[in-house]
Image (cartoon, coloured by chain):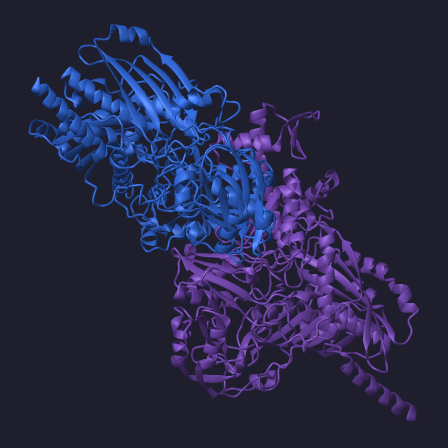
Chain colours: A blue, B purple
Amino acid sequence: MEDNSILYNYLLVLEEQQLSQYKFIGKRIARVDAIEKACGKAIFAGDLKFDKMLVGKVLRSPYAHAKIVNIDISEAKLLPGVKAILTAKDIPNNNKYNWANDAEVLASEKVRYIGDEVVILAAVNEDVAQKALELIRVEYEPLPVFTEYEQAMSSETERIHGDKPNNIAVKINVERGDIDKAFNDAKVIISNKYRIPTVHQSPIELNCAIAYFQMNKLTVYYGSQIYHQLKMQIAKIFNLREKNVVIKAVEIGGAFGSRNEQIVPILAAALALHTEHPVKIEITREEEFVAARPAMDMDIELSIATDEKGNFMGKKVYITASDGAYTSFGDAVLFIAAFRADTLYRFKNVKILAHAVYLNKPPTSAYRGFGSPQMHFAQESLIDELAERLNMDPTELRLKNFIHPGDISIHGYQINSCGIAECMKKAKELSDWQTKKQNKTFGTGIGVAALVHASGSRAGAPWFSGGSSTIIVDMFGGINVYVGESELGQGARTVFSQICAEELCCEIEDINVVIGNTDMTSFSWGTHGSKLTHILGKAVMIASRNVRDQIMDFAKKYLKINELNLEDSVFKDKKGNRLATFLEVVKRGCEENNGASFIGIGSYDTGAIVPDDGFGNVAPAYLFGVQIAEVSVNPSTGKIIVDKITSVHDVGKAINPQMIEGQVEGGVVQGLGMGLMEQLVTDRSGVVYNNSFLEYKLPTIYEIPKIQVGIVESIEPNGPYGAKGVGEPPIISVTPAIANAVYNAVGIRIREFPITPTRLHKLLNKKRVLYFKKKGN
Amino acid sequence: MEDNSILYNYLLVLEEQQLSQYKFIGKRIARVDAIEKACGKAIFAGDLKFDKMLVGKVLRSPYAHAKIVNIDISEAKLLPGVKAILTAKDIPNNNKYNWANDAEVLASEKVRYIGDEVVILAAVNEDVAQKALELIRVEYEPLPVFTEYEQAMSSETERIHGDKPNNIAVKINVERGDIDKAFNDAKVIISNKYRIPTVHQSPIELNCAIAYFQMNKLTVYYGSQIYHQLKMQIAKIFNLREKNVVIKAVEIGGAFGSRNEQIVPILAAALALHTEHPVKIEITREEEFVAARPAMDMDIELSIATDEKGNFMGKKVYITASDGAYTSFGDAVLFIAAFRADTLYRFKNVKILAHAVYLNKPPTSAYRGFGSPQMHFAQESLIDELAERLNMDPTELRLKNFIHPGDISIHGYQINSCGIAECMKKAKELSDWQTKKQNKTFGTGIGVAALVHASGSRAGAPWFSGGSSTIIVDMFGGINVYVGESELGQGARTVFSQICAEELCCEIEDINVVIGNTDMTSFSWGTHGSKLTHILGKAVMIASRNVRDQIMDFAKKYLKINELNLEDSVFKDKKGNRLATFLEVVKRGCEENNGASFIGIGSYDTGAIVPDDGFGNVAPAYLFGVQIAEVSVNPSTGKIIVDKITSVHDVGKAINPQMIEGQVEGGVVQGLGMGLMEQLVTDRSGVVYNNSFLEYKLPTIYEIPKIQVGIVESIEPNGPYGAKGVGEPPIISVTPAIANAVYNAVGIRIREFPITPTRLHKLLNKKRVLYFKKKGN
């Protein structure tokens, strides 16, 4: 058996699981930052103030599509207290804004959506800044506005971006296997169209950044998901050396994918560089809604072909999605929507045709699940219809087709751990599926949906996969874990503290996790793709073992003994006699090295690849789960009450069950909002209608059902202690579970969310009319 | 030959010197922080402001010695805007203030000098804080005041500190060789008494500290000379864990020894912990004069015995010094005054009796040279008298007796490099000594004095000697040098940048030196004893080589070549062909390690020991120098104009000649101030008379003579590239050189500085009277 084989790793981890009595891993450890956050002491960007700090503001386009004819800042410039007014020409590399190269820091010749950044300014206070905004005169020449897929795709001459015919930003066209044969040979073919609207991540905290330029160093405080990339981006845009740019992490009041995009800190940086004052930009809720990159809306047309026993033979998928005005992470979202869900089942023949289209609407981007919630809504809804057609229980149809551990999926994903069957079993038990199905009455329903996602998908950029961490143990026994990633509220600090405390046999409170500061941490790709616990957790584990080995080696030398155990911060001999404390040994070790701290480095290579044409193992592991929704529908009004959601996830190994429950509850609530009430509405002129929490409806405590969380531990050989991620899955497949439960309750299929009472009521009425018509016949 | 022998090291360094064409070492590189400092952009503690920051103030004792009967804060507490008023009982470990255990954070039962800290408070602004101070009523019961040595030492019953009979804080009583025999056998014995007053370091910047306590972490901004010890001290006083205390370095507007003592940040910390607001304390110039630990005043009685040829046979020294109210670094200063100067010559028999006495005056402490300027004034003045008695040129008498390379001095100091004879030769050349001596006229004079000091004296605390540094090279080629020491203005950042750039074959501007932040740097003892270039510089050199080796190893693997050169940030093969840039290789190396940076650790053990009874090798190397002063004296008024000072120093190897010149010029000016005009005057009731720059006279541009700097490179085997320190020496022996020149000009010996016109005029008058009397006879 080879040392590096998956099986060998798997056995190693299993053995470790059996041998180990973990002290912190798998325990319900309270979040290390709980008190600070609960007591309002945690520091967010908005909490920071600096001496002589200016207020930055953005003048945005009032047109969805227009040429910029002239910008007149002369009057605004004269207003006392205005320190800088910048337009596109003041930004050194204005066009180096994004990977897709289709956006600018400030719009130069054209604006492409209502909200596009045109001018920024800094002034001594809010009032002056606001007044100055109003004194700027921008002359526009309106252009045709595209807000619908077909309208945009059918336009040959008018383009939102000059080099993109038919306004197509991204196109995926892939076929694997023999799709025609599969559909020809099939006994059952089922097809439907699904429509997914734009929803907003709606973090509590508004985008806020503070930048200052002092002593030749640009410092930016911002709660980002990708600190090191932000550093690179700023260096590139402003012709600075990376070493002269530092991003300092602050707490983040919710990101959910929206902090991958980061215009606000770049604008703050521009103003700070020009004024040499600290500049703070905090956008409003209205700006957040239109300009902070909500989720991608999609039309999905899906067909599945099976044999007579329900074995999946083929799948065809057509996606048309809105990139909005620019490509943010829309390409990645489209990619994941197109490919990811195919790995849930043993598909052998698949055809995918997907387009992301430019529209004169807010640019769309990542939202928890990166396209998976969109595609799972279609796929898991359609499979429910298929089960009915085949007269099978939808859980049985899925179980028959689920992918297995050891499989390589149709897109080349290597499945190691896979607890999807156990998830289904547990979800059915926890929800009492069988009984509920049998005893159901009209108006109550139960629905199921399964899901797959990646545990740390490889970032699109091709440099490397994996992550690293540094651990410094200083002379005072202070244990500092440096990680170049973000604490988004997901509990990264706590998980890393658990891992490091486990490995160094110390207490949680001995650990100090330093998150994100780019001057102190090594390069990391960013906090997305449910990767933190798995990838960085493993790097922290390796770094902990590395520094522990160094300390252990010194301890043996110092204590003149060959066999030593470290337990609860005490070194003991084989017989369990106390020899010295961890602190004593570390102190002595540093002293003997002239004060130098012990430094451990952890580097974990996931082995994941950048898929070629969508084919290849994109992640070190895959995540599986099952959601079951129970609903009560009032057939007269269409009002839907979700009574319970059972949410079961294969997390590999639960590092902290309590935090997993927190993640699941949060994700389920977001999925529920998406399914029942959320939608960012843009009209045909590109105006976003509901850009406030009065008009954009989020779930409140009244709509939140009982959420029962189930955890399946499949022990992932690549993950730390067998763990993999769980950040995104809970949001995925909540909408189809609800849609399927609604069908189960009142016999109405809704293929467009949110499933609002209005929409349902209309369909119920239509059904009633048809029923009476039929009866009348 | 053993690998570790001094000689072997010496030859190694010599070989390196000959082989190397240094690119940065030895070059006149501009200070890396010059522009920021010259343009007022460097950030000092006083520049920092934080939101909701409070102003902290100190209520000080108006009595030089008194019992505290009662403190009534009731009225002050009621003043709106007062956030905290603290007395001794509010400080958890109030008595853990200093190493000597004789001082408290706030005086609890007694006050011991006018200025003693009694109450601190924090308020919303300066006005409220000041008003609150005035509302605090402290009732004192006055005690007898001691301001004179004999008065204090003769008091059996009244003690300033209860456990110290005769008010003696520190006593040193050491005899080596056979002092009685030496003096019995001697042909010439010369004795005199010298009086050295308290002078003040007078940094431009006032003591200022800002502390805040957030998220369970106490952060303190302060320009300290000993960041890590301050962290320890604060943790101990406030029962915090060291890991929860971070000291962040700010620029320092001059320290010169005075920032070893650090009450201000501790008081700010106390108020921050109590209020949970940021608190800033900035003391006034008046407070700085009395409470910020000026230099130690001393009475020195000195005798030297020689044979008829001027060979030194023995030396007796009696020192009585003022510790002031508490022991700050007075013990170290006394120790250095007592022992250090003996290593300048080949003394074989020495007797030392030294006392530091408690007085009800400002506590004294370290000032550039740590006691060496005091003792050298006595020794080098007396040797001048001795030369006259022996009818020898004073330079010849010294040359006859100087210590030699390879010697072990009477106190056990191992002399490796020693360029004292070369210094004397060069100083004589540069000042044209011979000609000036021969052609002198009444009223003009030339005087010489030599000096010795240690290059990185071992700190009193016994843990370890040496220093460490960490260098992190990140994926963007950013090179970060972490050093837990201080940039005092001495140019540490520049020297470390030169060393690191030399070793990594890159440019100065590629280097980012991170100074002092205790969260980012490894433990360091503190920046004193002329140690930075030598000890930390060597650690940086080792760390640079360590990280370079790692990068080189990777480069060989990556470029698939066994022999590589790194030149000007480019890797080349043996033939000089360009293969890859440093950045390319580093980027690739980090990528292949999942983003992990290259980390180099440098640890340098000086091998110095904590001397037992003053005996033992206290430093890795010793510094030598010669000062020659030329003066013009107006015999009618006593006015002295110093025309020129020639200052020649054995620096081992000049890393940056320009910065050495800066150090020398600064030190010489301070020595000049000490010799001619400075003195902090305390009256018998303990009142400091001249606590402002109106009354305390510092040299201005008008008094500064031509300063000619000479550099001797003796190549120190222990130092980096042969370098040793130069921080303190320039201030040492300026005063005796001036005193000797004054004697040479007008025949008046002044054994007490400052040599003011008044003092000289009085003695000139006295001499004239004697002359006329003699003539009259």
Would residue A27 be found to the left or right of residue A58 on screen?
Answer: left
Q: Nearer the viewer, residue B535 or B122?
A: B122
Pick the quarter of the image with the N terminus of chain A.
Answer: top left
Rendering coords of residue A77 (x, y %): 59, 50
**In the figure, residue B457 lies in which quadrant?**
bottom right
On-image quarter of the C terminus of chain A: top left
- Identify the image quadrant of residue A329: top left
Where A411 sits versus B655, above or below?
above
Depth check: B440 or B708 in front? B708
Q: Is residue B252 above or below residue B175?
A: above
> Considering depth in this image, is A490 or A558 the residue closer to the camera?
A490
Is A511 situated left or right of B520 in this image?
left
**In the figure, B508 relative to B84: above or below?**
above
Give the residue furthest to the bottom: B777
Residue B701 position, x and y percent, is 76, 67
Residue B389 at what x, y percent from top left?
A: 83, 75
* Observer able to see residue A86: yes
**To which quarter of the image does residue B459 belong?**
bottom right
- Residue at 64% of width from left, 69% of height from top? B202
Q: Is residue B306 visible?
A: no
Q: Residue at x 33, y 16 (%)?
A: A410
Question: Exactly how many numbered labels are in the figure?
Answer: 0
Residue B242 locus on image (x, y percent): 43, 57
**Residue sitting at 91 percent across and 65 percent down?**
B435
Q: Residue furthest right?
A: B439
Q: Nearer the viewer, residue A272 or B73?
A: A272
Judge whether A270 appears above or below B111 on screen.
Answer: above
